[in-house]
Image (cartoon, rainbow, N blue to C red):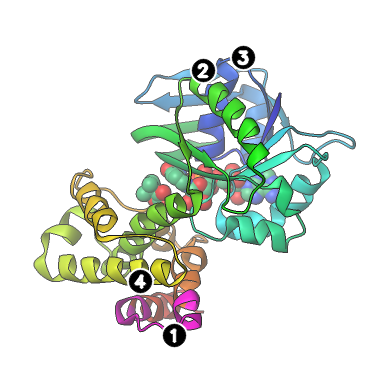
Amino acid sequence: MRIVFVGCGAVGGYFGARLLQSGEDVTFIARNHQLAALKQQGLTIKSIAGDACITDIQVMDKPDAGFKADIIFVTVKTFQLAGALPAIKSMLAPHTRVIPLLNGISAAKNLMEGGIAKQHILGGLAKIIAKVSEPGVINHTGATPHITLGLFHDSEASEQTVVNDLAQRLKKAGISTGLSRNIELALWRKYLFVAAWGALACVARVPVGPLRENSGTRAVLIKLMQEYRAIANSLRVEINQQIVDETLAFIDQLPEQSETSMQRDIASQTPSEFDALVTDALNLAREQGLDVPRLSFCHAILALQLGQ
Ligand SMILES: NC(=O)C1=CN([C@@H]2O[C@H](COP(=O)(O)OP(=O)(O)OC[C@H]3O[C@@H](n4cnc5c(N)ncnc54)[C@H](OP(=O)(O)O)[C@@H]3O)[C@@H](O)[C@H]2O)C=CC1
Ligand SMILES: CC(C)(CO)C(=O)C(=O)O
């Protein structure tokens, strides 16, 4: 099975490397410094789950003519998805399945709006705390690396075979893998965590420790999570109080200094996933006629800072 990762950053590089170690046929579509480093020195993983150094990587900046994939994991950032579409499209054969591992709840929709037919797309999400520390080097510092796969509610039931086969390969590679019967809910659950925490953390400009310990910001965080929950519920995604409580409990046990990638990106004035994590949610709330005062506040402050 030919597995391609479009984007070889923290997520693509980590999971691609683990699949390579397990003997899978993996190709990366990469660019810039990462492309040069992968060609010259290979891929190095520095990880709390064990280091790895893999030379002789199959990597291209754009797929060769006629190069087709069986599985394409999309592992670029949300604002890079449109730019990755030509590479994805050129690797599609009728049986190819495309699995976005991006944060947010709109990647599948954006792939479809970008011209990728629905039958090619399966659901997925990644959990890991990792970053590219220097070209060719992925630093995994937190969380058990995990991938959840699942069919969308309107996918063909026969697609389950593809998902099951891929899950077996991921597990064989030592990757914690979950199969979700409700991938929309799983994506929203992750969204509730990373977007609500991220939006407030970007406004407050503090790591998670002070944000959750200060009674004022903790109260705002809880209300903001309820607003994300209300948006999900208005779309018939069953984020319930138990999920909100579990998400808060998860935030409560993160290392004090944790920050979200959107927070780091905004602080360093590099492009961020603000549109996918904050603006998308606000637009959905407006479409549904919901009053979301904390989300509106965070959006207004951040949009102003970002010059939008
Ligand atoms: N990092 C983490 O711990 C986690 C991240 N996520 C999510 O996963 C997604 C990916 O994040 P992450 O891996 O951190 O991001 P990175 O920035 O580390 O990696 C993205 C990579 O894709 C490359 N890229 C972008 N467009 C193209 C293109 N058209 N062709 C080839 N390569 C391209 C980028 O290159 P360049 O640098 O040159 O732009 C970069 O190397 C995001 O949605 C993120 O929110 C989810 C869970 C955890
Ligand atoms: C899980 C977490 C918080 C890891 O960095 C993330 O997905 C993000 O920061 O975007």
Residue 229 location in percent, x, y? 34, 66
The magenta segment: 283-297
Q: Is residue 109 above or below residue 21?
A: below
Q: Are dots 3 and 2 in contact, CB under 8 Å?
A: no
Q: Which residue is mark 4?
A: 230
Taking 277 as reference, is 59 left or right?
right
Q: CA distance from mark 3 to mark 2?
A: 10 Å
In what element is the residue under mark 3? loop
* x 40%, y 76%: residue: 299
Taking 160 as reference, is 130 left or right?
left
Residue 65 location in percent, x, y? 89, 37
In what element is the residue under mark 2? helix
Task: Tell me the crowding category of disc 3: few under 14, some 14 to 19, or many 20 or more residues within 10 angstroms, Cα based.
Answer: few
Q: Is residue 203 above or below residue 116?
A: below
Residue 31, visible in the rendered structure: no
Q: Which residue is mark 2?
A: 172
Q: Earlier in the sequence, mark 1 or mark 2?
A: 2
Taking 261 as reference, is 135 left or right?
right
Q: Hey, what amino acid is under mark 4? A: Ala
Residue furthest to the front in view is: 157
Q: CA distance from mark 1 to mark 4?
A: 11 Å
Prevailing SS of the magenta stretch: helix
Q: Quadrant of residue 303?
A: bottom left
Q: Earlier in the sequence, mark 4 or mark 3?
A: 3
In what element is the residue under mark 1? loop
Q: Hey, what amino acid is under mark 1? A: Gly
Q: Quadrant of residue 46?
A: top left
Q: Say if the magenta span includes residue 289.
A: yes
Residue 289, which numbered label?
1
Q: Which residue is mark 3?
A: 23
Residue 19, visible in the rendered structure: yes
Frontmost residue, 74 versus 148: 148
